[in-house]
């Protein structure tokens, strides 16, 4: 998050503004860590598999991938899903191929929307905002933003 983006985030929340206005950068950072939008990350394959197992998705997809009588799609999508997990590499949940496989699994009733949503949620990581970042946003506003607002 840039200094400008953090400053905008601070200004969007009354609690963050209150802490900012009294120069309590620790409290402001703590509040910003709560309200900041999550960032996306590649998800370790074992996390995806654990969530798929917990939701019942893994067994359905694994059986579909092994069913040679099943047409392609959906068998190909199920095979891709299993292959990604078994390869053990982090999975980009926002990638077009991953999104496409999810849609095929959904359209053939091999997955439910809540199951796919739960897998997508694994990629969300909270942003940890530090006191130093709040100080940098304050300095950005003082030097750059403050000029636009008639203060220095």
Image (tube, grey):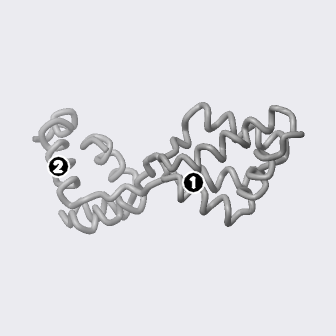
Q: Quadrant of the C terminus?
A: top left
**Is 142 positioned to the left or the right of 63 in the image?**
left
Q: Residues within 10 Å of mark 2 (few under 14, many from 20)?
A: some
Q: Quadrant of the N terminus?
A: top left
Q: Identify the element where label 2 is drawn.
A: helix
Pick whichever of labels 1 and 2 is earlier in the sequence.
1
Image quadrant in which you'd find residue 95: top right
Disc 1 and disc 2 in contact, CB within 8 angstroms: no
Q: CA distance from mark 1 to mark 2?
A: 30 Å
**Is 128 positioned to the left or the right of 96 in the image?**
left
Task: Name the residue rendered at 60%, 63% in the picture.
Answer: 50
Q: Identify the element where label 1 is drawn.
A: helix
* Residue 19 % position (x, y): 27, 65
Image mark for residue 17? none
* Residue 16 % position (x, y): 33, 61
Task: Name the residue rendered at 72%, 38% in the picture.
Answer: 77
Name the one closer to the observer, 68 or 119. 68
Task: Name the residue rendered at 86%, 34% in the picture.
Answer: 71
User: Circle 1 sits on which residue?
Assistant: 121
* Residue 138 % position (x, y): 18, 50
Query: Foreground mark, 1 or 2?
Result: 1
* Residue 104 % position (x, y): 76, 37
Name the one closer to the observer, 103 or 58. 58
User: Circle 2 sits on which residue?
Assistant: 136
């Amino acid at each position: 998050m840039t200094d400008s983006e953090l400053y905008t985030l601070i200004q969007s929340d009354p609690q963050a503004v209150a802490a900012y206005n009294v120069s309590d950068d620790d409290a402001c950072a703590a509040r910003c860590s709560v309200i900041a939008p999550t960032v996306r990350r590649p998800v370790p394959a074992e996390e995806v598999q654990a969530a798929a197992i917990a939701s019942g998705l893994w067994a359905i997809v694994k059986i579909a991938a092994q069913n040679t009588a099943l047409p392609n799609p959906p068998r190909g999508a199920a095979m891709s899903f299993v292959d990604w997990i078994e390869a053990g590499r982090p999975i980009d949940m926002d990638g077009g191929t991953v999104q496409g496989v999810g849609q095929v699994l959904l359209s053939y009733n091999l997955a439910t929307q809540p199951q796919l949503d739960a897998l997508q949620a694994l990629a969300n990581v909270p942003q940890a905002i530090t006191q130093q970042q709040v100080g940098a946003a304050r300095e950005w506003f003082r030097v750059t933003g403050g000029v636009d607002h008639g203060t220095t």
